[in-house]
Structures are given as structure tokens and as C-alpha cells.
Amino acid sequence: MADAVDKTPETIAAEKAAGQKKFIIIGVSAAVLITTAALIGYFATRGNGTSSGGTPSNNSTGSVNLSQAPSQASSSQAPQTSPSPSATGSPVLPSGQKKLLGYFGADAMANGVDIVQGTLPPPTDSTLYQKDLAYYCNTGYFDTINLAFLNLWGGAQNTFTITFGGFSTPNYVTDGTYVYKGDGKESNSAEVVRSYANLGKDIQTCQKRGTKVVISLGGDKVSAYTFSAGDGKRYAQLFYDMFLEGNGPVRPFGTGVVLDGIELDVEKNPNYPAVSSWTPEMIDLVNGLRALSPKTILAIVPQCYLGDSNFGGTDQNVGAVIPAVADKLDYLIIQYYNNPTCSYPFNFNYNAWKALYKGPLVVGLAGDWTSAISGGFLEAGPLQAVFDEIKGDPQFLGFSVYDVSSSTPPALSKSPATLANPPATSYSKTLRDVLNGVQVGSGFPSQAQLGVTTDRQLAQRCGGTWVYANATCSNKACNSNADCGVHEQCFNYMSLCK
């Protein structure tokens, strides 16, 4: 791990933030909200997102100074409409503190997304890369860590690959790829085996302090995972043996390391616009895991978008899976970033998801603007508005963040307002605080109740990221990515551009 430093990230963040202009997102009345001008006014003044406060310390033991721990203030919660009788899912969660789930492993802060220019080669400053797992657990912010991702399986081969991004700690190898060839033997290099064993020790450290650790299957649509006939039952047994209570011949994270759960994050449909042919296998996978491990955490991660007419108001990838296994699931994590048409502030469709699933719902958020190139990162003001809208709902379990490397120091907080000198991020703390009932900002409720999008909101502009193009009306109008520069995209839902 990295050597200890004299200054904590809290001190560094405070020094960098000193003198920077702060903006406050002003709440507006309900009457004003229904006008397009209110939305445009909001984006025109949306400069600030970060909240102040302590951030975790980096030291050589992976421990964190919790003297600046998140506040435990409580908030009153107004009752909201109960789920419709047609919804499916497990019984609603018991009362208690809302949860924060963090994705770990993908090193999203090193995505190579420049907020102005768009997708570029990854940054070379590895000191900002993700730290070891224990570092993030020891912040005290996260109730669950999702290991991301086991992103290759299928083909009736009983093989799989886990792919983690770069690390800044020598405790793990830089290339965190683990391959299982399906032959019951360990075939990875000694360095990879050692690295995963060290990660296994950190998993146990997290579990001892009460943080659950779940492995995430799938990820983005470019990953080569697939399902062949029989793979659902086949991989349920394999993953049980490799990661849960089973006795597999190989245990990637080390003997005696038992994960707390498995989530299914399938973001593609090989049969679009028809229902996915993988549906029966995904159902078998969930049912098989639940039968083998009754107490393990099982979750599915759909995209928030429900507007595709081909799928009757359900997710196009796993929409047919969820009702079939709803009683086997502990919760859904709904991805509310890189999905502008169903995200705050345009059409935050949380209530529509309540109609589909009556179990606990996690609102999936990005850790930074550079983790959500197509929009959806909630700075402090919008975050507060979303939380205030759903905090009293008994189905609301909490937030997830993709990922911890971009929402926790030493990562930087990059926005149009902080381009010249970005401070260390405090977003993980902001998420923990708001879930604890601390007021982190102000904003106005989303426009989901309006159900309309104006032509002006649908204006399009070339830009490196959605937020920068939106804030500056940068470059030129576009109809497709082909109209833009080599690193740019054509973004819609622009509020300021004509």
C-alpha cells in the first residue's frame, strides 16, 4: 500500500477548495417548476455540487481517520403511496438507516474521460487510481461493496473472467484480471493469485467491520458475457462453489473467503427488439443460487429506462427476469446515470419502478461527472432534491455509487466550475450524509410528474461530456455523433441551447 502522508485528504481538499467560488442551487416553488423557464434557470445557475466536510485519510495500513465521520442526524419522513397490488418482489425492508452501496474494481476515475474533450487515453497519474478495498471499507461510508466485474462467462464452458482496473497500491497487481478455464485447476500467474489472495484478506476485513461484499456479474454491453442453453444452472453451481458456501476446487479470493452475495448486471439483449433469449437462463441462475444459498444476497441491476414500446414498460435486458424471480431477490439497483430520459431532472421514474417491483429499490448514481459521460451525476443540490422526494418511501433502500474510486479521495471533483483546479472529491461523504438525514444542498423536485419534454430541452450539442456541453452550449449543434469531433458525442437534453 502507499506510504502515509503528512496531510490528510480532508486538509488537501480544504486547501484546494479555499477561494473557489461556491454556488447554491436555489429551490423554487412548485408553480415555477412546471414551466420550462424554471428548468433552464436551474441549469444556468447549477455551478456547485460538492458539500463540505471531512474525507477519509490514506495511510499505509488501510485505516481511515473517522474523526470526521458522517453525521447521524435523523430526518422526518413523510409517508408515500404504497406499491400497487400488481407489483412483484420481496416484502419491503424494515425501518432503519438507508444504505450506501459502492462499486469497487473498475477504477472509474481512470476511465479517460476529459470533461471538455471527451474520451481520451486513461490518465497516467496512478497515485489517483483506486486504492485497496480495505481503504474504502474503513471510511465507514459503505454498507455494501460490489466487486466489479466478473464480466466474461458462458458458452457452456464453465469458464469465467474477473476484470478489475488499475490499482495504485502494490498490494494488488496493476492488471487485475483473473481467468478460470473450467478445468478445476488454478492457472493464473503467482502474482495474480497473490493479488487476489490479498484482496480476499481485504474482503474479510470489510466483513468484520460489517460491510457486505457482493460480486457483480456482467457490466457494460461491450463485455463478452453470454448465456448458452444450460448455463443458468451450470453457473449457479459454479459460482456457489467458487464464491459462496460451496467447496470448489479453486477459490479465487482464497480458501475460507465467502462472499455475501451475487448481483446480475446484464446490460445487453442479443435478440433486441424481441425478449432476450437469455431470459430462461438468467431465471435459472437466480433460482439456482437461491436454492443453493438461501441466505445469500441476490440482486438485479436494470437500467432505469422503461420507454421502449417493444417491451411494454419493462427493461429491455432483464425486464422479463425480474417478475419471474422477484421473490428470490433482496433488492434491485436501478441505474439512473447515462440514461437521461429517465433520470433527474427530466423524468425521474422511481414511481414507475415501484409499480413493477414491490421489494427494496436502490437508486444507482454516478460518482462524478467523468463517470457519467452521458449525464446523470447528481451534485449536492439535485441529490438533496431526489432524496427528499423518495426518502419517506418504504421501498427506498438507499443509493449506490459507481464507483468508489471516483467518489472518494484521492479522486478529484471535476466539473465546469472546477476545471482549473479541481479539489479532492467528498462525494462519498455527501452520499453518506444525505442518507443519514444531513441536509447537503437544496434543489427542486424532479419533473417526473409532468411527463413531458419540451423541444428546447431536446436541443442537441457536441461536447466531451453532457455537463460541459450543457453548461457552455459548446461547439455546434448536431444530429448524430458523426457531426462532432473525434473525442466528442452528440448529447441531447440540453437546456440552454437552441
Image (tube, helix red, strand yellow):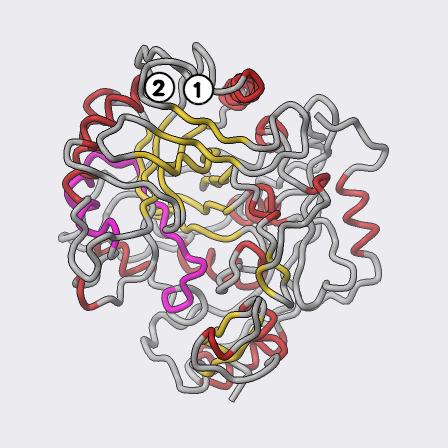
Residue located 36% across and 65% down the image: 342
First in sequence: mark 2 or mark 1?
Answer: 2
Rendered image quadrant of residue 186: top left
Q: Image check: 412 left or right of 292?
A: right
Q: Which mark is residue 252?
A: 1
Q: Is residue 464 inside the magenta stretch?
A: no
Q: Which mark is residue 360?
A: none
Q: Nearer the viewer, residue 222 or 208?
A: 222
Quick one: quadrant of the N terminus?
top right
Secondary structure under badge 1?
loop
Circle 2 is placed at which residue position?
242
Secondary structure under badge 2?
helix
Q: Image check: 399 left or right of 169?
A: left
Q: Position of residue 128 (x, y in %)?
A: 70, 42
Residue located 63% across and 43% down the image: 408
Q: Position of residue 364 (x, y in %)?
A: 43, 50
